[in-house]
Image (tube, rainbow, N blue to C red):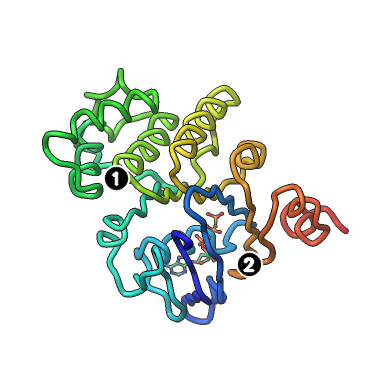
Amino acid sequence: MPILSLNSVSKSYGALKVTDAVSFDLEPGEALGIIGPNGAGKSTLFNLITGNVRADAGRIQIDGRDVTGETPMQRCASGIGRSFQIPQPFGHLSLYENLLVAARFGGGATAQDAPRLCLDILARTGLAAAANSLSGALPLLQRKRLELARAMATRPRVILLDEIAGGLTDAECVELVATIKSIHAEGTAIIWIEHVLHALTSVVQRLMVLNFGRMLMLGEPGKVMSSPEVREIYLGIEA
Ligand SMILES: Nc1ncnc2c1ncn2[C@@H]1O[C@H](COP(=O)(O)OP(=O)(O)OP(=O)(O)O)[C@@H](O)[C@H]1O
């Protein structure tokens, strides 16, 4: 059974259809990439999956159970973790405290288990040395790492990553990809929105292209990227 299913999910803002009858299944442990031009509706699709935005139509299921009417908190408890494109840490808390909140309230970790889990994630995301720093004043790389770490701390079965490689140096990007691969190797399913294509395609098994809210293509990354239609829309290369 798919771990996540979208069935004809739609969302409009006024006259603008931002998500247009999107349907797909995500298998347990799968890694799926999403690409598309700016404004194609990628982040909105994440917000629909997490419940931050309510769908106008369609159905969303986790493990075959209809969650379309559930809150973000309920969906997080069902195993959906996410990062935000614009990092949203609790700025007045330390990195460790931010993870503790995610682990206890998002992931349901016990008071006994949470500290070890958080310290482990801080180490895995290269943040251990900054554990006691305040989150509000972090440089870009650490803010991105913290977004990933907070999502990991909710102990998700599906982790949604929204453009976490943008703006990083090549070396930083290599480190980030290694961390994401290690999350995937543990059996966590991944949906990753990313403009840094070489990083994305080194991880994902399938690639989805969104354009004007519609799913243009979904398939094996090499095949998708060599499609003349995708090259024209996404890369601006005429067929
Ligand atoms: N709350 C909102 N109210 C009105 N319009 C919105 C709202 N949220 C998103 N939109 C519009 O919906 C469209 C899709 O936005 P979305 O952020 O999902 O795109 P995206 O593919 O993630 O873009 P980017 O690559 O630039 O992050 C855009 O035209 C955006 O302006």
Residue to which mark 1 is pinned: 154
- The residue at the point 45 percent across, 81 percent down is 57
Residue to which mark 2 is pinned: 215
Mark seen at residue 138:
none
Answer with left or right where residue 122 lies relative to residue 188: left
Q: Amino acid at mark 2?
A: Met
Q: Amino acid at mark 1?
A: Thr
Please tell me whether mark 2 sits on a helix, a strand or a loop.
strand
Measured in 3D between alpha carbons, the distance from the residue under mark 2 to the one under mark 1, in whole angstroms, is 29 Å
Query: Does the closest atom of ligand 1 sit within 8 Å of the Cβ of label 2?
Result: no
User: Where in the figure is residue 163, as x and y percent of width and height?
Assistant: 51, 45
User: Where in the figure is residue 135, as x and y percent of width and height?
Assistant: 28, 33
Q: Is residue 200 above or below residue 95?
A: below
N-terminal label among 2 and 1: 1
Question: Residue 64 falls in which quadrant of the image?
Answer: bottom left
- The residue at the point 18 percent across, 30 percent down is 115
User: Where in the figure is residue 193, as x and y percent of width and height?
Assistant: 54, 50
Please tell me whether mark 1 sits on a helix, a strand or a loop.
loop
Answer with left or right where residue 116 lies relative to residue 46: left
The crowding category of the residue bearing disc 1, from other C-alpha atoms within 10 Å (few below 14, some 14 to 19, many at least 20), is many
